[in-house]
Image: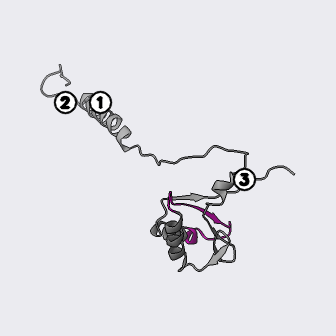
Amino acid sequence: MAIGIGGLSQTKSDINVTPLIDVLLVLLIIFMIVTPVLTKAMESEIPQKSDQPLPEQYSSQQLVVSITADGRYMLNKEELTLSYLPTRLRDVFMQRGGKKTIFLNADDSVPYGQVVQVMDLCRTAGAETIAVVSESIQTGA
């Protein structure tokens, strides 16, 4: 608060910044408390690289759904239509039992929406885990 010494006829106008600093400190404390609560993360399991081939007992049990560049759908080596894919997957899951894991391998030219549609169909067929197959990038000449 500013006090004028010159008497009542003089007007003294100074900006009092103390309330402004108090408000800024309160806002700073609020943001410091709220920021850690707003932090979200997506859980992902990144596999470790292995140069060893997959054992035969596991490679014969893999289910690989492939989408080719020309729009064909394959379950391992069997060509399927998109409407028949969930039915065939349910049959395979009932025969095999165990963990229901599917590997999805799509060509690079396949549209993203088509890949998501196949993932949704696999999930409705009962797949618990859908893994996306990626190719390693070849470097050098």
Q: Which amino acid does label 3 sit on?
A: Ser
Residue drawn at 78 percent across, 53 percent down: 138
Residue 108 lies within the magenta run: yes
* Alpha-carbon span between mark 3 and mark 2: 77 Å
Of the numbered discs 1 and 2, the one sitting upstream in the chain is 2
x, y percent for residue 123: 47, 66
* Alpha-carbon span between mark 1 and mark 2: 25 Å
* Alpha-carbon span between mark 3 and mark 1: 56 Å
Residue drawn at 35 percent across, 34 percent down: 32
Q: Nearer the viewer, residue 3 or 73?
A: 73
Above or below: residue 11 compared with residue 92: above
Return the residue found at the far top.
5
Disc 2: which residue: 11
Return the residue found at the far right.
141
What is the image's colouring? one colour
Q: Nearer the viewer, residue 134 or 57?
A: 57
Q: Is mark 3 on a helix, strand or loop?
A: loop
Of the numbered discs 3 and 1, the one sitting upstream in the chain is 1
Q: Which mark is residue 136?
A: 3
Q: What element carries label 1?
A: helix
x, y percent for residue 61: 61, 60
